Amino acid sequence: MHIGISSLMIQRGKTGVAQYLFALLRQLQARPAAHRFTVFVLEEDVPLFDFIRGGMHLVTVPERFRPAVHNIFWHQKYLPTLARELGLDVLHIPSYRRLLGRRPCPLVATIHDLAPFRVPGKYDWKRMFYGRVVVRWLARHQDRIIAVSQNTARDIVTFFQVPEQRIQVVHNGLEHERFYPGSARNAKAWARNRFQLERPFFLYIARLEHPGKNHLRLISAFERFKQASGCDWQLVLAGSDWHGAEVIHAAIKRSAERKQIKCLGFVAQSELPELYRAADAFVYPSLFEGFGMPPIEAMACGCPVISSTAGSLAEVIGEAALKVDPESVTAMADQMSRLTLDEGMAERLRAAGLVQARKFDWARTASETLQVYQQAATSGGSRLPLTTRGRPKVGDPAGEYISETL
């Protein structure tokens, strides 16, 4: 099969969709060359795909198509033409935000969550309208939809009315060669040098997004925990500023514990495993997740986890974390105190977390994703008539072909 994959929604590699796509491509490239892959990439993102050099073709897309509206326009206007010209057997769009309305070949989509239906005010009204109305229509044009959890699959049926037989649950994986237990002592020394983290700390890794990631309640819970316990622990927030970040920064400035709350900004993927190992506990109070990778990554690194059970999180964490109602500040503070005061709790959570993390593997995810491609190619919609077939020409406004040698 000749499989096309769009990467134009990865936002410079700093999102969960980006990490999903990078991990999937690594596994697909490592397999025997039974299939050909073409990946569509924005010009300035090309260096992010050096890891597939020599194994997959890249088609560059001009930077003027990076802004959201222009990006959507490129997917609807130019990508169907490119798919026909390249003779793609399957086209995979790994995010609901860029689904195609035209069907140049069988279409596969990955839907990570339907947060616009579950979290009021998660985005501005334009993005909420697009997610609730436009995407509902686009989803029905896909031949196969990959849902990253059972919870997301149920939401797709409920909110988009897509038939169950067109949905396949394929859980996200985990890069076990990166996320594994290591020396906590060495990790703490690294964290002191890298981020000046001198004290025990709770870690939360998520973009600074309000209200969806629930930072304000976490800050309030941390304040209660500090007042009740007298512990010298800190709260460390790692993630880029996003929609509503100014509300979070303002809450930190007002907090009586502001000197004990540290924002690291975006932390590179290469540094995440060591940061998890350095943390004394990982807390994940998100109001909704379609999957939720960070708790599993933390578990794999031997870090005890406190997690919300919203969305798919209960499905993902199993019984390997302390669970909280994300809307209860009291419950969150109580679990933080419980973990710090019960000497055996952290060890029990570490052991359970390592077992739970082994259930997720990107090699399995890639195998199941290939099966979805094959299902779409054999039973999906018929390809539209071709007027030309070949590589996009250099200078074409839709894109420019780059060979696998880059």
Image (spheres, rainbow, N blue to C red):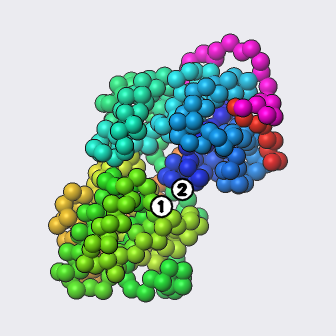
Answer few, some or many: residues within 10 Å of disc 1's Cα (few below 14, many 20 plus, some between 14 and 19).
some
Please tell me which residue lies in front, 55 or 6.
Answer: 6
Q: Looking at the figure, which quarter contains the N terminus?
A: top right
Question: Is 384 within the magenta?
Answer: yes
- Helix, strand or loop at disc 2? loop
Region rendered in magenta: 371-397
Residue 236 pos. (x, y %): 39, 73
Disc 1 + disc 2, Cβ < 8 Å: yes
Residue 72 pos. (x, y %): 54, 33
Which residue is disc 1 drawn over? 240
Which badge, 1 or 2, comes first in the chain's sequence? Answer: 2
Which residue is disc 2 drawn over? 14
Please tell me which residue lies in front, 158 or 372.
Answer: 158
Residue 190 pos. (x, y %): 54, 82
- Helix, strand or loop at disc 1? loop
Residue displayed at 81% across by 41% down: 403
Going by the numbered disc 2, the residue's amino acid type is Lys
Going by the numbered disc 1, the residue's amino acid type is Ser
Residue 85 pos. (x, y %): 73, 24
